[in-house]
Amino acid sequence: MARIEVEYFSNALVRPVTFRAVIPNDFRAAVPGIQAPVNPHMERPMKVVFNLPGYTGGAEWGNEMLAMKYNTAIISVYGENAFYVNNASPSGQFQTFIGEEMVDYVRRTFGLAMKPEDTYITGISMGGYGAIHTALAYPETFGKVAGQSSALIINQIAHMKEGEDNGVNNYAYYRFLFGDLDTIQQSTANPEVLVENILAEGKKMPDIYFCCGTEDFLIEPNRAFDKFLTEKGVPHVFKTSPGGHDGKFWMEYTPKVMEWFFEG
């Protein structure tokens, strides 16, 4: 198992950045007299899961045993509380950083993520929004996307006014990241707009999976996105079960996300 921390200069963020890669590129030889289990995932090229952590970061997502089980590299990169979108700063082009630059770097450096069917993206909370938004912004790059407890808050912060906040951050923060909050619902910051663009342009929709705990403060925005996709006729998987916005729920669903990616 290769565990690598990489630093390179990001032109999208105009500074050096680091990311962590887990690459299961070594396997134990067969032991005489012991029948090794058959793993069909070893019969295909290695796939890649780009992982986007949530607001303030937190524990790095990705179980090394799951990476080995499914013959997939996991690339974890943090979005600096910036929702993985291109913001008003020339040095804050996080959508470009993840959806274009990081993918290109992984392709050139490791020879991985060469095709959409080998390239997946996932995230938790802010990272769940980032994963869904990025996959829909680059449907020709990502074959599958999964969001856990995704911060699909665009409709909730629309029309927020100066001095207001939503319990996580304030108007100035969201205004800087997303632009005019009075028109944000019609902008490409809104995953619903990106879905409509894909449908209008006849592009292939990434496969979509998302989940949320029924006690999570983000459950209603996730239910609303499920309803929107259903009304648009977009195939997707939406799962709920008892749980909050916490590690217990994510520990339960991380193996389920991996199973959906590779066996669903």
Image (tube, rainbow, N blue to C red):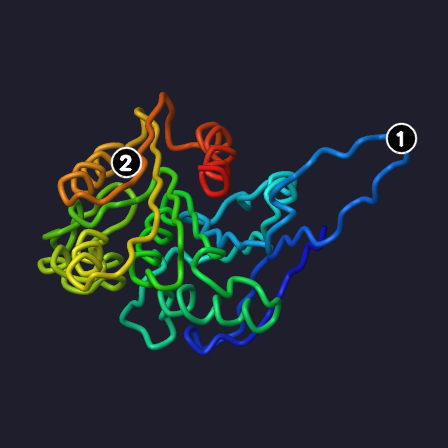
SS of the residue under disc 2: loop
**Given the image, on which type of amino acid does mark 1 rest?**
Gly
Mark 1–mark 2 CB contact (< 8 Å): no
The vertical placement of 4 against 9, above or below, is above
- Residue 253 place in picture, x, y as percent: 46, 32
Query: Residue at the location (32% across, 30% down)?
Result: 216
- Residue 11 place in picture, x, y as percent: 45, 78
- Residue 52 place in picture, x, y as percent: 45, 52
- The residue beneath circle 2 is 218
Q: Which mark is residue 241?
A: none
Name the one closer to the observer, 128 or 142. 142
Mark 1 and mark 2: Cα distance apart in space: 52 Å
SS of the residue under disc 1: loop
Dividing the picture into quadrants, the one containing residue 205 is bottom left
Quarter of the image with the C terminus is: top left
**Given the image, on which type of amino acid does mark 2 rest?**
Leu
Quick one: label 2, few (<14), some, or many (20+) residues within 10 Å?
A: some
How many numbered callouts?
2
The vertical placement of 107 against 60, above or below, is below
Q: Left or right: where does residue 171 sit relative to residue 240?
A: left
Dividing the picture into quadrants, the one containing residue 97 is bottom left
Q: Left or right: where does residue 215 sit relative to residue 34?
A: left
The vertical placement of 38 against 201, above or below, is above
In this view, the residue farthest toward the top is 242
- The residue beneath circle 1 is 33
